[in-house]
Amino acid sequence: MNTPKRRGRLPEAEREQRRNDVLAAASAELIERGYDKSTMLSIAQRAGASKETLYSWFGGKDGLFVEMITRNADQTAERIRTALVDEGSPRSALEGFAVGLLGLLTSPESVALNRSAMHSAALAHDLLASGRHRVGPLVESYLAASAAAGHIAVDDPAEAFEVLYGLVIRDTQIRVLLGEPAPTRAAITERATRAVDDFLRLHAVN
């Protein structure tokens, strides 16, 4: 009698692709239906996976959304590092950062995750840790290095970042969270340029 072959683990590349498919499905589900109406079953069906697989991988809905936040944060951190590569001009580096930040915080996925964080303390904690508390030190290090090189005048990089962040974001994110349309790419670029102009005037070397 032939013994049935046991189904083995998926190859690593295929497993990673399946996880990415699930995360993409979860993002689409969250954007379309919101946190309360998104379920592990609906996400599994959208991804063409089993609900049991999702629970095995992520433990539950919050675990799945936390992984979405973590992966998004990894990608964001890498984009910020790239934007802050010093090409001899703090203006170009900071404008690249500002455009990326505004685009990210007003994107459909970011808006959906921020709204979800209002329903879950775990998501709120991870969103803050992966967002503001991860981005801040990257930009603060850049500002400190630029000040040391004599490009800008900054005594306290953490305080300078708070000023820059406020100038870039203003009330844009909260207005989008409350239902206003996200700014266009052209509007984002214009706002980022204005914010960096204001920041560099405040921190000009005398």
Image (cartoon, rainbow, N blue to C red):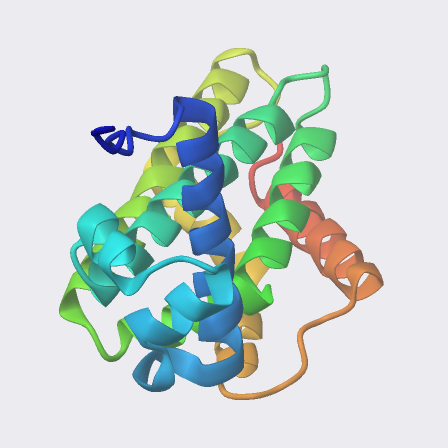
Residue at horizontal 56 percent and vertical 37 percent from the top = 203
Residue at horizontal 67 percent and vertical 82 percent from the top = 181
- Of all residues, the one furthest to the right in this rendering is 186
From what the image shows, is residue 83 above or below residue 101?
A: above
Residue at horizontal 19 percent and vertical 62 percent from the top = 60
Front residue of 105/88: it is 105
Question: Residue 99, percent across and down?
Answer: 68, 49
Question: Residue 185, percent across and down?
Answer: 79, 60
- Of all residues, the one furthest to the front in this rendering is 1
From what the image shows, is residue 27 above or below residue 58?
A: below
Instruction: Tally the marks.
Output: 0
Question: Residue 5, percent across and down?
Answer: 27, 29
Observer able to see residue 162: yes
Front residue of 9/145: it is 9
From what the image shows, is residue 46 above or below residue 167?
A: below
Front residue of 6/152: it is 6
Residue at horizontal 16 percent and vertical 55 percent from the top = 59
For the N terminus, which image quadrant? top left
Question: Residue 94, percent across and down?
Answer: 63, 36
> Residue 154 sits in which quadrant?
top left
From what the image shows, is residue 60 above or below residue 16?
A: below
For the C terminus, which image quadrant? top right
Observer able to see residue 131: no
> Residue 187 sits in which quadrant?
bottom right
